[in-house]
Amino acid sequence: MRDELIAHERFFFDFHQMCEQLGLSTEAAAAKFTAWRERAEEATR
């Protein structure tokens, strides 16, 4: 904590269950996350 505020937070979730509840394909959602992460990594180079 910093100044009585949370400075960092981490959470975990069941990716497959989340996709199922949202009506999304797990494979398609994972591919989108992979592409997003790769673009973010390229932008920081």
Image (tube, rainbow, N blue to C red):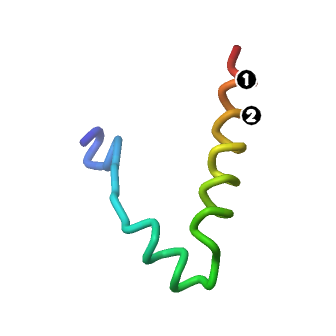
- Pointer 1 and pointer 2: residues touching (CB < 8 Å)? yes
The amino acid type, in three-letter code, at marker 2 is Arg
Residue 8 horizontal side relative to residue 23, left or right: left
Can you name the residue that lies furthest to the top here?
A: 45
Which residue is at 37% across, 65% downward? 13
The image quadrant where one finds the N terminus is top left
What residue is drawn where x is 29% and y is 41%?
A: 3
Query: Is the residue marked by circle 2 packed among few (<14), some (14-19), or many (20+) residues within 10 Å?
Result: few
- Find residue 19 and name its label: none
Quarter containing the C terminus: top right
* Real-space Cα separation, disc 1 to disc 2, in angstroms: 5 Å
Percent across and percent down for residue 28 are 68, 63
How busy is the neighbourhood of tag 1: few (under 14 within 10 Å), some, or many (20 plus)?
Answer: few
Which is more toward the observer, 40 or 34? Answer: 34
Q: Give the residue at mark 1.
A: 42
Q: Up-down: is 34 above or below 41?
A: below
Task: Give the structural element (helix, strand or loop) at label 1.
Answer: helix
SS category of the residue bearing label 2: helix
Q: In the figure, residue 36 lies in which quadrant?
A: top right
Locate residue 22: give its quadrant: bottom right
With 43 as the anchor, is 11 left or right in this view? Answer: left
Residue for badge 2: 39
In-front residue for pair 2/39: 39
In the displayed structure, 38 sits above or below 26; it is above
**Residue at screen point 38% across, 68% down:** 14
Q: Position of residue 9 (x, y in %)?
A: 34, 49
Residue at image point 31% right, 49% down: 5
* Kind of residue sitting beneath label 1: Glu
What is the quadrant of residue 34 in the picture? top right
